[in-house]
Image (spheres, grey):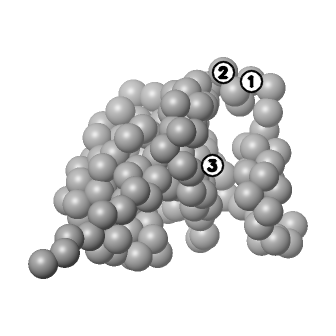
């Protein structure tokens, strides 16, 4: 009997609702560990996770047993619930609707990992919106400005 062999590397970009900077440095590592647990629970491999107070980047090795949309929904809903239960945020915490998902070959992973690990340095010179639009352009994803993550309000 044959087996299934795949190599699927995806980077997800998730933004906090209205790009509010509510992911605080004091608990972001706990959040990243919690999200890692969700990813691993579904049989995928966490490669790298990091972000800023208003968004995160998640790089995984994905198994073909689950759709991208289903995994992202699980990450968003479970992590939002966890943040609320931990009372890390006064009021409501929500991820913004939508997300980015970008695929990479194995040879590109070291650069992507380095990029994700250095988010704080990167965002000293590049805004989140500019970063996100550059991903869409680099991957030749047709988009409309009105559907890009909302700016801070």
Q: Position of residue 62 (x, y in %)?
A: 37, 59
* Disc 1 from disc 3: Cα separation: 17 Å
Residue 45 in view: yes
Residue drawn where x is 29% and y is 57% of the image: 44
Q: What numbered label is drawn on residue 94?
A: none
Query: Disc 1 designates what residue?
Result: 124
In front: label 1 or label 3: 1
Which quarter of the picture shows residue 15?
bottom right
> Which circle's residue, 1 or 3, is located before the other in the chain?
3
Task: Estimate the spatial distance between the alpha carbons at disc 1 and disc 2, rounded to whole Å.
Answer: 5 Å
- Work out which residue is located at the far left of the displayed protein and give it: 1
User: Which numbered disc, 2 or 3, marks the residue that appears first in the sequence?
Assistant: 3
| Left or right placement of residue 73 versus residue 135 in this view | left
Confirm or deny contact between disc 1 and disc 2 (CB under 8 A). yes
Count of residue discs: 3
Identify the residue at horizontal 66%, vertical 52% (top origin). 19
Q: Nearer the viewer, mark 2 or mark 3?
A: 2
- Front residue of 9 and 16: 9
Find out whether the residues at labels 2 and 3 contact each other: C-beta distance under 8 Å. no
Q: Residues within 10 Å of mark 1 (few under 14, many from 20)?
A: few
Q: Is residue 142 left or right of residue 68?
A: right
Which residue position is annotated with label 2?
121
Distance between the Cα atoms at labels 2 and 3? Answer: 19 Å
Residue drawn at 78 percent across, 52 percent down = 138
Q: Is residue 100 above or below residue 115?
A: below
- Graded by Cα atoms within 10 Å as few (under 14), some (14 to 19) or many (20 or more), the crowding at tag 2 reads few
Please tell me the numbered disc located at residue 20: 3
* The C terminus, quarter of image: bottom right
State the image coordinates of residue 56 (x, y, percent, origin top left): 53, 45
Q: Secondary structure at mark 3?
A: loop
């Amino acid at each position: 009997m044959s087996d299934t062999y795949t190599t699927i590397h995806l980077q997800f970009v998730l933004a906090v609702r209205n790009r509010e900077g509510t992911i605080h440095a004091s608990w972001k590592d706990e959040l990243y560990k919690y999200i890692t647990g969700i990813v691993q629970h579904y049989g995928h491999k966490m490669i790298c996770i990091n972000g800023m107070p208003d968004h995160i980047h998640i790089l995984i090795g994905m198994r073909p047993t689950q759709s991208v949309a289903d995994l992202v929904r699980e990450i968003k809903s479970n992590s939002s619930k966890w943040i609320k239960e931990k009372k890390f945020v006064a009021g409501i915490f929500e991820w913004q609707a939508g997300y980015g998902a970008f695929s990479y070959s194995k040879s590109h992973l070291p650069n992507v990992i380095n990029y994700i690990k250095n988010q704080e340095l990167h965002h000293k010179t590049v805004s989140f919106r500019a970063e996100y639009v550059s991903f869409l352009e680099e991957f030749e994803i047709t988009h409309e400005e009105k559907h890009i993550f909302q700016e801070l309000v």
